[in-house]
Image: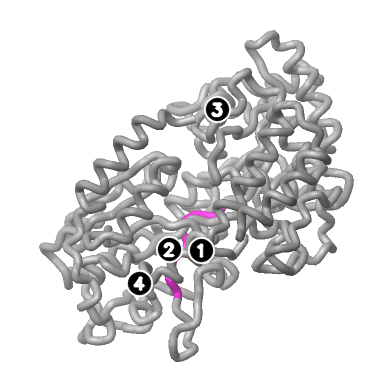
Amino acid sequence: MPNRKLAAAGLVAVVALGGCAGTGGGDSFDPNSVEGAFDWKRYEGTTISVMLSEHPWTDGLKERLGEFEAKTGIKVDLQTYTEDLYFDKMEQAVRSSSSPDVYMLPMDDTVVSQHSAGVIEPLTPYLENSALTAPDYDFADFPRGLIDSSTFPGADGKALDHQIPIVTEAYILFYNKDLVDQYEGGQVPTTMAALLESAKKITDAGSGDVFGSVMRGARTDTLRDTLTGVVLNQIPLDRKIDMPYNFWFDGAWDKPVLDDPQIVQGMSDYAELAKYGPANRLNLDWQDTTALFAQGKVAYYIDASTFGPMFENPAESKIPGRVGYATIPKGAVEGSTATWSWGINIAKNAGHKGAGWLFIQWATSKEMTATLGALTGAAPRLSSATDPIYVDALQAEFATAVADALETSRTSTVQREGWKAGAFVIVDAMMAIVSGGDPAEVMANANSEMVSALK
């Protein structure tokens, strides 16, 4: 878990600085008033503030910022933060009078909250203005299903798109081929029951040097997506899931179903996989779990597909070429997994919205989406599936596993303001099971706590 004193000090600093280096006054900009031919140099001489979470996508973007600055004459003041700290800083910043011009935002309930608060700039007017949008941008190249998660009706009933997707994640199984060869004769478990048995066997034999499995365990609401992916493995594909509730409720916010046997089983699976990790299992966030796996100390790891390319990078991993990829081993039913996306958008109070929109177009162009998708393993444009930049960069087994996962995956999103409180009820339940609590009893108690949390 992050050092809370350091996190608090960082938050004080960002509040004192007024969030980011924007100039405010964003409401005075009217995208409909911009006329003439599209020109990448339209806002030459401008400096924009861009606020991003640390992520493989962000790492790749940093390396190419000079290209954007040369193309547009726009300077970029880039600020990045670790994911756990980013959310607090971002929420503070976009509500300040000097918010960032461009920032990353998850395409989930966070968008619902910020839309209701009126802190997101609608992008439809920009997309529809040929003076502001490059003729080859091709917005239709993004799957509508991704865009829909952050599209809301305007005052006139017209759809207002608030985000452009930058990376999509599915939850898959990563496995260390050397360890599977050593302990299981190369036989990869094909069922969840077999995976749990193998993970225990390897941890018991590893004597604290090698672990059968590792999972995120730190108390953070961002853990909800990985948890959802594992629980969906125990929920039948033919079971209807109603939004905005996902599978956690029965048609109303005061009717949680956390004690549903299939949900209990999925939560138990996650907790058991976490138990077979190191002693500090409940302090591990994704940075820690990916590092352990990349060091060759873990046999099995279920998490976001975006980590795949990192495990094949010799600069970041000790096991490139020795990682296997598969969909999550089958549960008691024919289930699926979850998908989740990051997006990028303009803050309502941004001081340089026009220049910010040029940055978004460049960062989410076909060429950049394919290039950055090769780093994350999840390019959100349809055209990337046949783009050699993207396809040739990915390990074949990895690409197949991700494609198979996405074929049946369901969203991890719960579209409700204040869902963070509900997410913590679920995360706390997982932690209680890891600590020895009876899964059915823990989830029954969590059901009652959910009702209180969402009041």
**Gap between marks 3 and 1 measured at Cα:** 35 Å
Q: Which residues are magenta?
A: 161-168
**Gap between marks 2 and 1 measured at Cα:** 7 Å
Dot 2, how many residues are within 10 Å of its Cα: few (below 14), some (14-19), or many (20+)? many
Judge whether residue 95 can be spotted in this image: yes
Looking at the rendered structure, the kind of residue marked 4 is: Glu
Compare marks 3 and 1 and give the one earlier in the sequence: 3
**Position in image of residue 10 (x %, y %):** 30, 38
**Position in image of residue 44 (x %, y %):** 13, 66
Looking at the rendered structure, the kind of residue marked 2 is: Lys
Looking at the rendered structure, the kind of residue marked 1 is: Arg
- Secondary structure of the residue carrying numbered label 2: helix
Q: Which mark is residue 381?
A: 1
Q: Nearer the viewer, mark 4 or mark 1?
A: 4
Judge whether residue 247 can be spotted in this image: no
Q: Which mark is residue 366?
A: 2
Residue 367 sits above or below residue 170 on the image: below
Q: Nearer the viewer, mark 3 or mark 2?
A: 3
